[in-house]
Image (cartoon, rainbow, N blue to C red):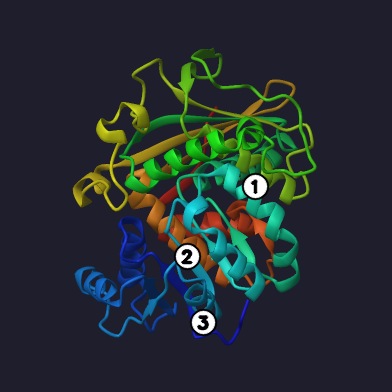
Amino acid sequence: MHADAEFDLIVYGASGYTGRLVAEHLAQRYGVGGEVKWAMAGRSAEKLAQVRDEIGAPKDTPLVVADADDPASVREMVRRTKAVITTVGPYQLYGSDLVAACAEAGTDYLDLCGEPNWMRRMIDAHDATAKETGARILFSCGFDSIPFELGVYFVQQAAKDRLGQPARHVKGRVRKMQGGLSGGTAASGKATMEALQKDPSQLAVMMSPFGLTPGFEGPAQPPGTAPADDPDVGPVTPFMMAVINTKNVHRSNLLMGHAYGRDFVYDEMTMGGPGGPATFTDLGSLPGGGPKPGEGPTKAEREAGFYDLLFIARADDGRQVRAAVKGDRDPGYGSTSKMLAETAIALVNAPDVPGGVWTPGAALQGRLVDRLAKHAGLTFEVEAA
């Protein structure tokens, strides 16, 4: 990380739907010359200026022109900052050069990626370089997968206190949720399906809970692909995001030196039978395949959204610890944009974290729990079993 960089953070994609929300959060909470020196970046200076004015950011908010189709402009942007936050997805189409540039320059990188096939390629290609240069590369800094990754971390800390050690099995359960899908999420799902059709070898990464833990294969995991009756919570149904979240939880465990054990088991489901808590709309059922990139819920819809997640850590003797993670905005946008911004600030404020391809929870652990609780509308609490 460059101590003398011009900026702490650059929000790349700031004129897009989610990037704009990230910039708005930074403008409202930090201004421009405050605790965080940040800039807005995108393809068009004119569009960036328009968004800056619309979100009420100070007139002197710096604007940086960079375009994924112009690698030189991307490298130039990366040299000017300690960290780049990117919302320009699908990342498998627009992110590879940026990850490479950050890894080479020693600049931190944060995104909202839920594309495990691409993440694995980036781990294999850039982890060694990032370790050398000190670049910290953090994927999945939004609803996938921070509340789940940190939920497991938080309940395991409680298990250590109350049960004497981390639990070998943790369950993640979506208790309640209200929120919409973004055009970007829909586009990422589509890009992943197309990539798998072109290169079926990537399917192994998608299908395995250990697809993001190169060199480590843990025990068999519950598939979570069919409705079931969970003795701890009642009826449960599959959760669309589990395919990415479970991989990040296992990578987090690996990166923390198997803090939860080498035989750790984790599964994720939605509580209630069919028609239980509102979940993300199934992509295939949306007219025209869902919203277009750049589209998403209204401000009123974002503010009406929320989520309530339950984590159950079960000891081998049957004792358990339960913890809840809740968010005060819709998961896909309102909460995600705050999580991404605050994770970047936490990372810039943590020069002791070494370089490499991390998960947010493994890199920042309790520091991130505290920061998100203080600044991003999340709550973490232990519940009575």
Q: Marks 1 and 2: in contact by CB < 8 Å?
A: no
Above-or-below relation of 251 to 30 = above
Residue 65 lies left or right of residue 166; in this view the side is: left
Q: Secondary structure at mark 1?
A: helix
User: Dividing the picture into quarters, in which one does residue 37 lie?
Assistant: bottom left
Find residue 344 and report its horizontal and vertical position in percent. Answer: 51, 65
Q: Position of residue 167 (x, y in %)?
A: 70, 33
Lower position in the chain sequence, tag 3 or tag 1:
3
Q: Quadrant of residue 20?
A: bottom left
Residue 55 x %, y %: 23, 68
CA distance for labels 3 and 1: 27 Å
Which marked residue is nearer to the observer: mark 2 or mark 1?
1
Q: Which residue is mark 2?
A: 85
Residue found 33% across the figure and 77% down from its top: 31
Q: Position of residue 23 (x, y in %)?
A: 34, 67
Q: Earlier in the sequence, mark 2 or mark 1?
A: 2
SS for dot 3? loop
- Residue at 51 percent of width and 76 percent of height: 72
Q: CA distance from mark 2 to mark 1?
A: 19 Å
What separation in Å lies between label 3 and label 2 (alpha carbons)? 13 Å
The residue positioned 36% from the left and 80% from the top of the image is 32
* Amino acid type, residue under disc 1 in the picture: Arg
